[in-house]
Amino acid sequence: MSGEVRLSRRRFLRYAAGTAGALVIGIGSAQALERATPVALLGDAWSQVGPYLRVAADGRIFIGVRDPDNGEGTSTSLARIIAEEMSADWNRVVVEPLGLGIEQGNGEPRFTYGRQRSGDATSIPAAWADLRQAGALARWLLLQAAARRLGVPADQLRGENGMAVAADGRQISYADLAAAAAGIEAPKTLPPLKQPERYTLIGQPAGDVDATAVVTGSLRYALDDSLGNPVIAVLARCPYPGGALDTADRDAAKKVPGVYDVIDITPEQGQVAGMAAQAPALAVLAQDTWSAMKGRAALKATWKAPEHPEPSTSALEQKALELFGDDAATPSIVRQDGDVALARKKAARALEATYFQPWVAHATAETPNCVVRLDPDTSVTVIAATQSPRQVYTVVQRMTGFRPDQIDIQVPRGGGGFGRRLEQDYIAEAMAIALAKKDDAIRSRPLKVLWTRDDDLARDYYRPMAVHRLNASLGKGNKIVGWHQRMASPSALVGRAVPGDRLWQSELVADALPAGLVPNFRSDWYPLDSTLARGEWRGSPHVTPTFASESFIDELAHAVKANPLEFRLALLGDARQLPYSGRGGPIDTARLANVLKLAAEKIDWSRWLRSENGLGIACAYVFGAYVAHAVEVAPTADGIDIHRVVCVADVGRVINPLGLEAQLQGATMDALSTALNLAITIKDGKVQQTGFRDYPIATTQPLPYEIETAIVPSTAEPTGASVIGVPSAAPALANAVFRATAVRVRRLPLLREFARLR
């Protein structure tokens, strides 16, 4: 083992010989750059390095994936970035999920794998440079070893499908070169990256690396882990936000056969939202799930509502309308260009619409769960599906006081995230129970905390409800010369250490279109008070305002008897780059116009005016990606039939087209299901939904049998894709229904997320 390699001031790679002649390459932390550790001194202490890949002597290539995979496809796409750069044989690649990479450094935790976060369309953009460098270093070392073996210059060799290949046809497998490669001195400069024209994996379709295990039922999710013979815990939680326990029969619960104990859970005070238990609760500990559930029922727990219970959605909606009409109410001004009031005075025509959107839950297929094995004196192991392992560590460390080397966070594949697993309340609950176990018979056993579906719906971090009022001023040629949008909602950033004047950032993006397209533009946000927990949901903060703005654009086109597609294209105007303060900017209007045109072409938009069915279209710019949906619907006696859905996306360079297609289809289905069916409602201060009977995720009907996707070829830097199919799907559906009905109505009952027009 020898050498070290400095790649930049932010990242560096280390490598060495592992056991059995393997080449191991890992990425270290930024802090270690200040005092780099020679590889020769590391030995086999690879916990300090965090291996990203290992070339084994038997020919297999093990690639560790740092970001959690909750169905986003990160296990496949991130591994293919490394495999591409090192010219690996994909059939010999074994993908392994990495737990949290952490070590002690200068009194502070050092995260050795980088960011480790998923679900907000950042995994690929954040990993693109790091992982290519790791793969390129592996290829460089292997080709250097092959050059010595074959007696030719390394620049006359190439990597190909797990082999080092010479110009004369001679070749040596990476497996035979691994041990020698580990002893080669590090390069003084960064190894060159592959030119895109030589890519053989990136841009080519690949099935999910876990697909076989998923469909055969052999894949182990977090819910399947147990660490031996765990104690099972289910919780009875206070259903009232801000409420408290009234009565409970603990003795009756303990008399249920198989029940060990009942433990009171009190949420920690003063913690950031999402980082502590959400509600007062009673945890029933038992030998199995059935006994725990029977014990919970035997508690017959009753709860007290707070003095000021959570208002109903209709009450919050009315409050929003009052704020819009109160000149004394002071909103946060998100963005202001020109003078919208003056534009309205001078306008040839002005229009206004009000839109209402409900609370929405995540309803992940796998409900929250957590396994904890705690030795109060030495260590703790936590197994949980999460989208942010570093936040799990923060909770565990705070509650135990352990050093980083005493905390093991394991992150198996999760059954859906959608933003729910960015919250760590279920981790905090599990840790509180593990720390409170007193009975010697169960104290040494692992703990497994399970949530039921009614638990999940009653104590989610919901997408906030919202009310929008939009005003537009039209000038000559029906051009939009003024746009004033007002939004009222309970911010998802309340309680998360965000200044009050920035709370709108969970609800709005300052530069989101049509900002920059209209000379007089203003965006205002009004806070609504709520005690319901809320958080990120599939594309926040794009999804909520996009529904309102894209629906309103159709309203404007209808009012001036214009083709909605042409009206949008005219609004986008000439191709140009618009400044954008959010992630992924600037906005290229030509790329957005292109996805609109392609979606229209594939739905045959030329039928728009004469079709008996309704055609709707909408577009969005989301985290650097451009997406458009076109939908065709037909009214029926019972509602609507969705005949066709087209989704077109431009995400820059595509890592795995098949994975991207799956993400677009899944996100579109979720958005349509939400628009058609879903709303969380509040009555008497608590959530009313308890399962899929009253929170009906759509099945085969009325969803379309097929969603046609089109991916725009691009050489731009890659963006994420897990959420981009959500924001424009619902407004495209609403616009199609609006066209199908061909009449203004106060409320379309077919769509919970459609407008109440004023």
Image (cartoon, helix red, strand yellow):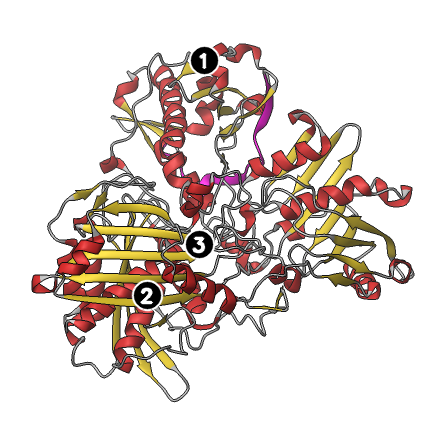
Q: Which residue is denoted by mark 2 in the rendering?
A: 731
Residue 364, image x and y in percent?
A: 55, 58
Q: Is 299 or 538 nearer to us in this picture? A: 299
| Location of residue 145 (image quadrant) | top left
| Above or below 278: residue 174 | above
Tell me if I can see residue 510 in this picture: no
Q: Which residues are magenta?
A: 86-105
355 to the left or right of 692: left
Residue type marked 1: Glu
The residue sitting at the left extreme is: 477
Residue type marked 2: Pro
The residue sitting at the bottom extreme is: 637
Give the CA separation, mark 3 to mark 1.
Answer: 41 Å
Q: Which residue is denoted by mark 1 in the rendering?
A: 4
The residue sitting at the front extreme is: 328
Q: Which residue is denoted by mark 3 in the rendering?
A: 538
